[in-house]
Image (tube, rainbow, N blue to C red):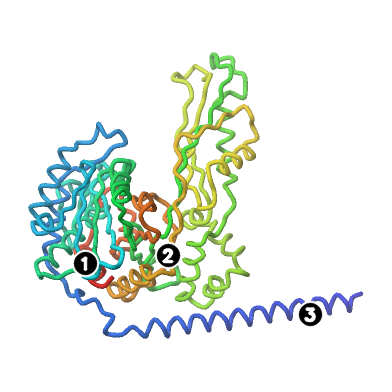
Amino acid sequence: MGAMNLILFLTLLLIIVLILIIISIRTLTIQRKFKKQANSVTKEQSNKYINYDSEEPINILTGAIKYKTISYKDPSLTDWKEFDKFHDYLKESFPLTFEKLSYPCDSPNNLIFKFEGQDKSVKPLLLIAHQDVVPANEAGWDTPPFEGIKKDGYLYGRGSFDVKILVISILQSFEELLRKNEKPARTVFSAFGCDEESSGDNGATKISEQFEKEGINFEMVLDEGGAVAEDYIKGIDKPITAIGIAEKGYLDLKLTRVKNGGHSSTPNFPTAMGEIASAIEKIEKNQMKPRITKPIKDLIHNLGLSAPFGMGVLFLNQGLTSPIIKKAFSGGQTTSALIRTTITPTMMSGSNAANIIAKESWALLNCRVLPGDSDEVIIKYIKKIINNDNIKITVVNYKEPSPISTINTEAWNTLKNTIKRTFPDSITTSFLMMGGTDAKHYHNVCDNIYRFEPCQMNQSEIAKMHNDNERMSFDNIHNATKFYLDLITTF
C-alpha cells in the first residue's frame, strides 16, 4: 500500500512539473513574440503632429474653466445662462469651426459639429465629450476652482481633467485643420452634451436620438474613459493605456423594515433599525462572487505580455490560473471591483429624535453591476444573504450594464495605433469602466464604442478627478490635441 501511494505521489508530482514546464515555455514564447512585434514599429507609423506645441489650447482651456457649467439632477437647478456664455466663449475661440462646421442640434444647450471628410463612402467617426462639471467646494482647494490657475506646468480648475480638456482639444484640432485647409480622412462629427455628470437625459440621450432619427450611424464613437496610467500595477514599468469597451451598470436598492416603534427607555429588540443594520453587515461580509468578464480577461492577458516572468505565467494562462487571479484581485479595493458586482450601503435612516425608536428604518444600497448580472439577479442574491422576509427590497434606479464592444475591428486597430504613435512607450489594453459615461447612450447608432482620455498621468493625478485641486499638465493638453489631430486625419 505504501509503494502504491509513493507511485501515485510521484506520478502527480511529475504531472505538476510537466504542466509547469509547458506553461513556462508557453509564457516565454508569447512574451517574446509580443516584444518582437512591439519593436517593429516603423517611422511611417509616427504621429506627424507629435511636435505640436501651440499655447492656444492651454490658454483657451484656462478661459473655459471660468464658466461654472455645473449640471444638477434637477435641470431647474442648473444655470443654463452659464452654458450660453460658455458657448459664446467657444465661438469666439474657434471662429472657423463655428462658421464652417456647426451642425443643427434639435436639443437646447448641446453642441454638434460636422467636418466633411475626403472619403464619403465610409461611415463617419463621432468624438464626444461633455460640457458640464461637478460642483467644487472652494474650501478644500489650494487655488480657486473656477479661475483656471497656471502653476508649475499644470492648469488647475474644475473641468481641466473632467472633461473640458477634451472639448477644447477636439475643437482645437478642427480649427487647426481648417486653417491649413486640410480635411479629415472620413467625415467626423463631434457632440458635446450638457448633463453627463447628472444623468445624460437631456444631453447625450437627446443627441443620439437625433442621430438615429436622421439615419446616421458611426464606425466608431470615442468618449472619455481610461487614460495612460503610470504605476498601474506593481512589476510593470511601462504606462498602461486602458480603453473602456464597456461599463458597469448602475442600481440603487432600498431596504425597508417597518415594525412597532416606541420610547427608547423600553426597547423591544431587534428594532427596525437593528434589523436593517444586521442586513447591511451580512451584505458587506458576503459580497457577490468574483467573475472575470471579457474586458477584464483581455486586460489581464495584455498586462501579462509585458509583465515579469512570474506574473506572466499567472496572467497568460488564465485557463489554469483564474482561481488564483480571482483570489489575488479580491484582495485589492480597485481590482476587487473589476471582477464582481459591488453592493455598497451609502445611506440609512431611523427616527428623528434620540429617544424615539423608529417605526420605519431604511438603507440605500448602491450597486455597480457587472455585464451578465441584472437587478433581478442582485435582489435574489441579497434576499438569500440577509434571510429576512420582513425587509422589503425596492428598485429606486437601474441602468443596465452597457453592451461590450468588440476589439476585432478596424476602428479598434486604428485607435490602438493612434495611441501608440502619441504614447509610444505605453501598453494598450481594453478594460471595464466602473463609472458611467455618455458613451452608453450611443449604442443605438454605433457598435464600436470606446472610452479613452488621451492623457498620461500617475495614480495621484487620476485621483484628483471630481476632487479638490483637479488639474491637468500642459504636456497632456498638448498630447490630447496631438492625438485628435492624428486620429481625425488617419482614420
Q: Residue at x 21, y 41 (%)?
A: 108
In the rendered image, the vertical position of residue 389 relative to residue 300, given as above or below: above
**Gap in Å between the C-alphas at discs 1 and 3?**
68 Å
For this rendering, which residue is in front, 422 or 461?
A: 422
- Give amino acid for label 2: Ser
**Discs 2/3, front:** 2
> Which circle's residue, 1 or 2, is located before the other in the chain?
1
Question: Percent x, y for residue 5?
Answer: 85, 75
> Which circle's residue, 2 or 3, is located before the other in the chain?
3
**Discs 1/3, front:** 1
Q: Which residue is mark 2?
A: 430
User: How dense is the environment of label 2, judged by Cα within 10 Å: few (below 14), some, or many (20 and up)?
Assistant: many
For this rendering, which residue is in front, 49 or 135?
A: 49
In this rendering, the count of numbered labels is 3
**Gap in Å between the C-alphas at discs 1 and 2?**
28 Å
> Which circle's residue, 1 or 3, is located before the other in the chain?
3
Question: Percent x, y for residue 202?
Answer: 29, 41
For residue 321, which numbered disc appears in the image? none
**Gap in Å between the C-alphas at discs 2 and 3?**
42 Å
* Image quarter hosting the C terminus: bottom left
Q: Secondary structure at mark 3?
A: helix
- Give amino acid for label 1: Gly
Q: Residue at x 54, y 49 (%)?
A: 373
Compared across the picture, whether 383 is left or right of 344 comes to: right
**Discs 1/2, front:** 1
Compared across the picture, whether 342 is left or right of 203 comes to: right
Q: Which residue is mark 1?
A: 117
For this rendering, which residue is in front, 270 or 427?
A: 427
